[in-house]
Amino acid sequence: MKALIVVDIQNDFLPGGALAVPDGDAIIPVVNRLLPVFPLVVATQDWHPANHGSFAANHTGRKLFEQIELNGLPQTLWPVHCVQNTPGAELAGALSREGIARVFPKGTDAGIDSYSGFFDNGHRKSTGLGEWLKAQGVAELFVCGLATDYCVKFTALDAATMGFKTHLIEDASRGVNLRPDDVRKAIEEIARAGIAVMQSADLSNACGG
Ligand code: VGL
Ligand code: ZN
Protein backbone atom coordinates (compact mmCIF):
# COMPACT_ATOMS: atom_id res chain seq x y z
CA MET A 1 0.00 0.00 0.00
CA LYS A 2 0.99 3.64 -0.61
CA ALA A 3 0.90 6.28 2.13
CA LEU A 4 1.51 10.03 2.31
CA ILE A 5 3.49 11.58 5.19
CA VAL A 6 2.66 15.24 5.82
CA VAL A 7 5.58 16.70 7.77
CA ASP A 8 5.14 19.50 10.35
CA ILE A 9 2.51 21.69 8.64
CA GLN A 10 2.10 23.69 11.85
CA ASN A 11 1.32 27.33 12.56
CA ASP A 12 4.82 28.18 13.80
CA PHE A 13 6.28 27.12 10.43
CA LEU A 14 3.88 29.31 8.42
CA PRO A 15 4.41 33.01 7.58
CA GLY A 16 3.86 34.97 10.82
CA GLY A 17 4.91 31.98 12.94
CA ALA A 18 7.89 31.69 15.29
CA LEU A 19 10.03 29.77 12.77
CA ALA A 20 8.33 30.79 9.55
CA VAL A 21 9.29 28.91 6.40
CA PRO A 22 9.20 31.37 3.46
CA ASP A 23 6.09 30.71 1.34
CA GLY A 24 5.22 27.77 3.63
CA ASP A 25 1.48 28.42 3.38
CA ALA A 26 1.60 27.96 -0.42
CA ILE A 27 1.79 24.17 0.03
CA ILE A 28 -1.48 23.82 1.96
CA PRO A 29 -3.87 23.80 -1.04
CA VAL A 30 -1.44 21.49 -2.86
CA VAL A 31 -1.40 19.05 0.09
CA ASN A 32 -5.20 19.27 0.51
CA ARG A 33 -5.57 18.15 -3.12
CA LEU A 34 -3.18 15.23 -2.51
CA LEU A 35 -4.95 13.87 0.59
CA PRO A 36 -7.83 12.09 -1.20
CA VAL A 37 -5.40 10.49 -3.65
CA PHE A 38 -3.91 8.29 -0.87
CA PRO A 39 -5.51 5.35 0.94
CA LEU A 40 -3.54 6.34 4.06
CA VAL A 41 -2.20 9.70 5.25
CA VAL A 42 -0.22 10.37 8.42
CA ALA A 43 1.16 13.64 9.76
CA THR A 44 4.12 14.46 11.97
CA GLN A 45 3.94 17.24 14.56
CA ASP A 46 6.98 18.99 16.05
CA TRP A 47 5.98 18.91 19.75
CA HIS A 48 8.58 20.40 22.07
CA PRO A 49 8.53 20.94 25.84
CA ALA A 50 9.24 24.61 26.77
CA ASN A 51 12.71 23.65 28.10
CA HIS A 52 13.76 22.05 24.79
CA GLY A 53 17.51 22.08 24.11
CA SER A 54 17.04 23.23 20.48
CA PHE A 55 15.79 26.66 21.62
CA ALA A 56 18.45 29.42 21.66
CA ALA A 57 16.54 31.00 24.56
CA ASN A 58 17.44 28.00 26.74
CA HIS A 59 21.22 28.58 26.32
CA THR A 60 22.55 31.75 27.96
CA GLY A 61 24.96 33.67 25.74
CA ARG A 62 24.00 31.77 22.56
CA LYS A 63 22.53 33.34 19.45
CA LEU A 64 19.76 32.25 17.11
CA PHE A 65 20.85 29.81 14.38
CA GLU A 66 24.23 29.24 16.07
CA GLN A 67 25.57 25.66 16.02
CA ILE A 68 26.26 24.03 19.38
CA GLU A 69 26.76 20.51 20.66
CA LEU A 70 23.75 19.11 22.52
CA ASN A 71 24.41 15.87 24.40
CA GLY A 72 27.06 14.88 21.88
CA LEU A 73 25.15 15.84 18.72
CA PRO A 74 25.47 18.96 16.54
CA GLN A 75 22.47 21.24 17.11
CA THR A 76 21.27 24.40 15.36
CA LEU A 77 19.69 26.81 17.84
CA TRP A 78 16.17 27.78 16.82
CA PRO A 79 13.64 30.33 18.03
CA VAL A 80 11.17 28.94 20.57
CA HIS A 81 8.69 27.04 18.35
CA CYS A 82 6.04 24.32 18.45
CA VAL A 83 5.77 24.28 22.24
CA GLN A 84 3.33 21.56 23.34
CA ASN A 85 -0.28 22.74 23.72
CA THR A 86 0.34 26.22 22.23
CA PRO A 87 -1.39 27.58 19.09
CA GLY A 88 1.95 27.61 17.23
CA ALA A 89 2.21 23.83 17.61
CA GLU A 90 -1.24 23.15 16.14
CA LEU A 91 -1.51 21.79 12.62
CA ALA A 92 -2.37 24.59 10.18
CA GLY A 93 -6.07 25.44 10.34
CA ALA A 94 -6.39 25.35 6.54
CA LEU A 95 -5.05 21.78 6.35
CA SER A 96 -7.84 19.20 5.85
CA ARG A 97 -7.54 17.28 9.12
CA GLU A 98 -10.21 14.72 8.24
CA GLY A 99 -7.91 13.20 5.62
CA ILE A 100 -5.22 12.42 8.22
CA ALA A 101 -5.46 9.02 9.95
CA ARG A 102 -2.85 9.54 12.67
CA VAL A 103 -0.52 12.27 13.95
CA PHE A 104 2.93 11.31 15.26
CA PRO A 105 4.53 13.81 17.68
CA LYS A 106 8.32 14.21 17.69
CA GLY A 107 10.94 16.28 19.50
CA THR A 108 9.28 15.62 22.86
CA ASP A 109 12.54 14.86 24.71
CA ALA A 110 14.20 18.13 25.91
CA GLY A 111 17.70 16.68 25.50
CA ILE A 112 17.59 15.70 21.85
CA ASP A 113 16.08 17.16 18.67
CA SER A 114 14.13 15.12 16.15
CA TYR A 115 14.06 16.31 12.56
CA SER A 116 12.92 12.95 11.20
CA GLY A 117 9.39 11.75 11.83
CA PHE A 118 10.81 8.26 12.46
CA PHE A 119 13.70 8.71 14.94
CA ASP A 120 15.42 11.37 17.04
CA ASN A 121 18.60 12.90 15.60
CA GLY A 122 20.77 10.32 17.39
CA HIS A 123 18.62 7.42 16.14
CA ARG A 124 18.24 6.47 19.81
CA LYS A 125 14.43 6.23 19.98
CA SER A 126 11.76 5.50 17.39
CA THR A 127 8.55 7.56 17.28
CA GLY A 128 6.71 4.38 16.28
CA LEU A 129 5.86 5.77 12.82
CA GLY A 130 7.87 3.24 10.79
CA GLU A 131 6.63 0.24 12.75
CA TRP A 132 3.03 1.46 12.49
CA LEU A 133 3.24 2.03 8.73
CA LYS A 134 4.71 -1.46 8.22
CA ALA A 135 1.94 -2.96 10.36
CA GLN A 136 -0.61 -1.26 8.05
CA GLY A 137 1.02 -2.95 5.05
CA VAL A 138 2.62 0.23 3.67
CA ALA A 139 5.58 -0.36 1.34
CA GLU A 140 5.70 2.93 -0.59
CA LEU A 141 5.88 6.40 0.96
CA PHE A 142 5.39 9.91 -0.40
CA VAL A 143 6.82 12.69 1.76
CA CYS A 144 5.90 16.40 1.72
CA GLY A 145 5.63 19.35 4.12
CA LEU A 146 7.92 21.70 6.06
CA ALA A 147 10.82 22.17 6.01
CA THR A 148 12.49 20.63 2.95
CA ASP A 149 16.02 21.20 4.29
CA TYR A 150 15.30 19.82 7.80
CA CYS A 151 12.35 17.66 8.81
CA VAL A 152 11.20 16.69 5.31
CA LYS A 153 14.74 15.71 4.30
CA PHE A 154 15.47 13.60 7.38
CA THR A 155 12.01 11.96 7.26
CA ALA A 156 12.54 10.99 3.61
CA LEU A 157 16.10 9.70 4.24
CA ASP A 158 14.94 7.56 7.19
CA ALA A 159 12.00 6.24 5.16
CA ALA A 160 14.38 5.04 2.46
CA THR A 161 16.77 3.55 5.04
CA MET A 162 13.85 1.67 6.60
CA GLY A 163 13.21 0.01 3.25
CA PHE A 164 10.17 1.96 2.05
CA LYS A 165 10.12 2.87 -1.66
CA THR A 166 10.26 6.63 -1.10
CA HIS A 167 9.27 9.73 -3.07
CA LEU A 168 9.62 13.44 -2.26
CA ILE A 169 6.81 15.68 -3.54
CA GLU A 170 8.88 18.79 -4.18
CA ASP A 171 6.15 21.36 -4.86
CA ALA A 172 4.22 20.22 -1.75
CA SER A 173 7.27 21.14 0.39
CA ARG A 174 9.15 24.36 1.24
CA GLY A 175 12.45 24.94 3.02
CA VAL A 176 14.01 27.41 5.45
CA ASN A 177 17.14 28.21 3.34
CA LEU A 178 19.20 29.58 6.27
CA ARG A 179 21.96 29.52 3.62
CA PRO A 180 20.66 30.30 0.10
CA ASP A 181 21.48 26.86 -1.40
CA ASP A 182 20.18 24.70 1.45
CA VAL A 183 16.99 23.55 -0.27
CA ARG A 184 18.77 22.76 -3.54
CA LYS A 185 21.43 20.79 -1.62
CA ALA A 186 18.79 18.95 0.40
CA ILE A 187 17.00 17.86 -2.77
CA GLU A 188 20.29 16.68 -4.27
CA GLU A 189 21.05 14.67 -1.12
CA ILE A 190 17.55 13.16 -1.19
CA ALA A 191 17.95 12.18 -4.85
CA ARG A 192 21.40 10.66 -4.19
CA ALA A 193 19.78 8.42 -1.55
CA GLY A 194 17.63 6.84 -4.27
CA ILE A 195 14.49 8.79 -3.41
CA ALA A 196 12.38 9.85 -6.41
CA VAL A 197 11.89 13.62 -6.54
CA MET A 198 8.53 14.37 -8.15
CA GLN A 199 5.81 17.05 -8.46
CA SER A 200 2.23 16.82 -7.20
CA ALA A 201 0.89 17.00 -10.77
CA ASP A 202 2.70 13.73 -11.60
CA LEU A 203 0.60 12.01 -8.96
CA SER A 204 -2.81 13.44 -9.69
CA ASN A 205 -2.22 12.65 -13.38
CA ALA A 206 -1.18 9.07 -12.60
CA CYS A 207 -4.25 8.63 -10.39
CA GLY A 208 -6.69 10.14 -12.89
CA GLY A 209 -7.14 13.57 -11.30
C1 VGL B 1 11.99 21.89 11.89
C2 VGL B 1 13.74 23.15 12.66
C3 VGL B 1 13.40 22.88 13.97
C4 VGL B 1 11.22 21.36 10.71
C5 VGL B 1 11.63 21.59 13.18
O1 VGL B 1 10.03 20.99 10.87
O2 VGL B 1 11.80 21.29 9.60
N1 VGL B 1 13.04 22.66 11.63
N2 VGL B 1 12.34 22.08 14.20
ZN1 ZN C 1 11.65 21.81 16.21
Image (spheres, rainbow, N blue to C red):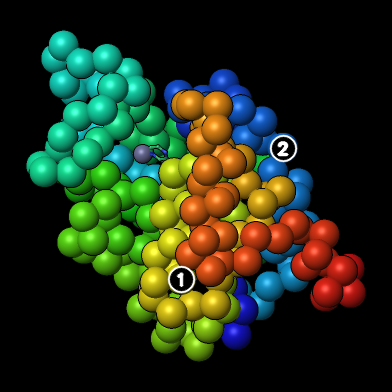
Q: Residue at x 70, y 60 (%)?
A: 198
Up the image or down, 36 lies above or below 22; here it is: below
Is 7 drawn above or below residue 69 in the view shown?
A: below
Q: Quadrant of residue 57?
A: top left
| Residue 155 % position (x, y) | 44, 58
Q: Amino acid at mark 2?
A: Ala
User: Where does residue 19 sit, x and y in percent of width and height?
Assistant: 46, 27
The residue at 62%/66% (across/down) is: 196
Query: Looking at the picture, does residue 64 appear above or below residue 26?
Result: above
**Could you say which quadrant of the image residue 140 lies in?**
bottom right
Q: Quadrant of the C terminus?
A: bottom right
- 29 or 152: which is nearer to us? 152
Residue displayed at 20% across by 16% down: 62
Give the residue at mark 1.
160
According to the picture, the residue beneath numbered tag 2 turns out to be: 26
Q: Which amino acid type is shown beneath numbered disc 1?
A: Ala
- For marks 2 and 1, give the one nearer the viewer: 1
Asked if residue 201 lies left or right of residue 126, the reply is right
How crowded pointer 1 is (Cα within 10 Å; few <14, some 14-19, many 20+) is rated as some
Q: Position of residue 78 (x, y in %)?
A: 34, 27
Between 92 and 116, the one lying in front of the other is 116
Q: Which mark is residue 140?
A: none
